[in-house]
Image: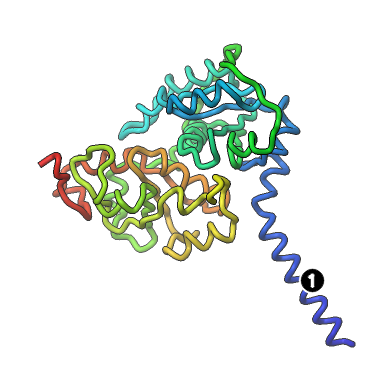
Amino acid sequence: MRLRRKAVICIISVLFMVSVFAGFQDAYAKDGGAVVETQWLADNLNNVKIVFVDNWPSAKESYEKKHVPGSVYMGIGALMGTISPNPPDKAQFEGMMNRLGINNNDHVVLYGIDGESVFTLGAYWLMEYFGHKKVSYLNGGLAKWNKENRASESGMKVAEAGKYKVGATDESIRIVADDVLKNLNKPNFVLVDARGTGEYKGEVNNDKNKRVGHIPGALDLDYYKTNFNADGTLKSVADLKAAYESKGVTKDKEVVSYCQGGIKAANAYFVLSHILGYKNVKVYVGSWGEWSGLDYNKYPIVGKIAEEKK
């Protein structure tokens, strides 16, 4: 009888721990944290500022046809010029927030045409960099919202101008090329290449870089395959943890993500920082677009000179 009781207690304890771990991501949705689910947003439409983020004409058309009620459209192309070797532009960011009707104390929910829309978490990183305190990401995006037949609007919403002011930027989440270079051979420094295997191996040159390949020591962790399910929702905490830790991306290290221009890298940053709870994660904003064009004698690559640039 005593053994049976101990066994029952053990099973209950295990099930409790499993439920806690599995529910880690759900906890965000309940308090409006970094990740929110569609039901949470439906229940809080009047308490938040909702922003649809993208940069492709087709996505803008989708927004105009059908979007979450009250949401405004951010064409991140107006900010993408700031994802470069230089710090993102403060005045440009303020202008965008004011056009969208956002104020400093607003709780902003960002979403895209689908969950894995690359631009959404790029906007999230920018808002965090500029010190915005209340930002959430809608898991599954517009695709999940529409699939659930939730209320929607059409047309282009014009917001009343905001009064946004940027204070101090958060430089702890940004890193520049020279700092990457200084840390390349340190054992507790790890680089995450979020672009994709073709670009990582130097087989693809989507952006006509001078050189193709990757930064020495970088790990090939495609932003989409690593972080998202086939339906565009975020993978479970267990799957995300396994994906990164199996490659050696662990909490005890300084982690820097990069891609072509800082956008896909922001997706890796978001998962590591806000879902897995890593404390030391940065985005190399210049990314491969900058690194591949620098002096090879100083900034090494694993790759070759691109054929079209010979």
Residue placed at 87% from the left, 87% from the top? 2
> Would you say 37 lies left or right of 304 here?
right
Res. 137 visible in picture: no
Residue closest to the eye, 107 or 69: 69
In the image, residue 135 above or below residue 70: below
Residue closest to the eye, 188 or 50: 50
Residue 30, picture quadrant: top right
- Secondary element at tag 1: helix
> Would you say 103 lies left or right of 16 here?
left
In the image, residue 196 above or below residue 163: below
Number of dots carrying numbers: 1
Disc 1 residue type (three-letter) = Ile
Residue closest to the eye, 283 or 67: 67
| Quarter that holds the C terminus | top left
Query: What colour scheme governs how the chains and residues are painted in the rendered image of this protein?
Result: rainbow
Residue placed at 47% from the left, 29% from the top? 54
Residue 50: give x, y in percent of width and height. 62, 27
Residue 33: give x, y in percent of width and height. 65, 41
> Would you say 58 lies left or right of 47 here?
left
Q: Which residue is mark 1?
A: 12
Bin the neighbour count of mark 1 within 10 Å (Cα to Cα): few under 14, some 14-19, many 20 and up.
few
| Quarter that holds the N terminus | bottom right
Residue 306, picture quadrant: top left
Residue 284: give x, y in percent of width and height. 36, 43
Res. 206 visible in picture: yes
Residue closest to the eye, 62 or 36: 62
Residue placed at 42% from the left, 63% from the top? 247
Residue placed at 42% from the left, 64% from the top? 248
Taking the view exactly as shown, the residue that stands out farthest to the right is: 1
Taking the view exactly as shown, the residue that stands out farthest to the left is: 310
